[in-house]
Amino acid sequence: MENDNQHQKTKTILSSWLFKPALEYYLSKPDSDFNVFVDNDFKTSSDYIYCFQKEKEMIADSAAYVTMIDYSDTKTVLLRRK
């Protein structure tokens, strides 16, 4: 995500409440340009979504996202807006 060449200054990442503390920890660098949002129903639009694989079907606008990374060991995925 850090090397993603989108030209928007502040990027948003959406997740359920479960992942918010870890995401905020890893994205808390002073030069980080990410805001973490919680939406357990995945109806909020964002630049990225980090969720369990089984939660992908809950995403309201799933056609607008592409899978960047599929973490098979944790059964999670990182999605990026097209």
Image (cartoon, rainbow, N blue to C red):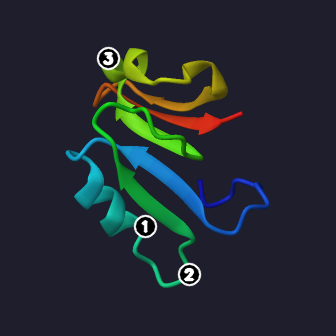
In the rendered image, residue 75, in percent from the top left (x then y), is placed at: 31, 25
| Amino acid type of the residue tagged 1 in the rendering | Leu
Residue plotted at (59% across, 59% down): 11
Q: Nearer the viewer, residue 50 or 73?
A: 50
Q: Residues within 10 Å of mark 2 (few under 14, many from 20)?
A: few
Q: Marks 3 and 2, Cα distance to the nearest angstrom?
A: 32 Å
In the rendered image, residue 62, in percent from the top left (x then y), is placed at: 55, 21
Residue plotted at (38% across, 20% down): 58
Q: Marks 3 and 1, Cα distance to the nearest angstrom?
A: 24 Å
| Amino acid type of the residue tagged 2 in the rendering | Asp
Q: Secondary structure at mark 3?
A: helix
The residue beneath circle 3 is 54
Where residue 16 sits, quadrant-wise, is top left
| Amino acid type of the residue tagged 3 in the rendering | Lys
Q: Residues within 10 Å of mark 1 (few under 14, many from 20)?
A: some
Q: Is 68 on the left or on the right of 3, as rendered?
A: left
With respect to residue 45, does 62 lie above or below?
above
- State which tag comes first along the sequence, 3 or 2: 2
With respect to residue 72, does 68 lie above or below?
below
Q: Nearer the viewer, residue 5 or 37?
A: 37
Residue plotted at (39% across, 33% down): 42
Q: Secondary structure at mark 2?
A: loop
In the rendered image, residue 21, in percent from the top left (x then y), is placed at: 24, 60
Which residue appears farthest toward the left when viewing the image? 18
The residue beneath circle 2 is 31
The disc at residue 27 is 1
Q: Residues within 10 Å of mark 3 (few under 14, many from 20)?
A: few
Residue plotted at (61% across, 61% down): 2
Q: Nearer the viewer, residue 73 or 43?
A: 43
In the rendered image, residue 63, in percent from the top left (x then y), is placed at: 63, 19
Q: Is 42 on the left or on the right of 81, as rendered?
A: left
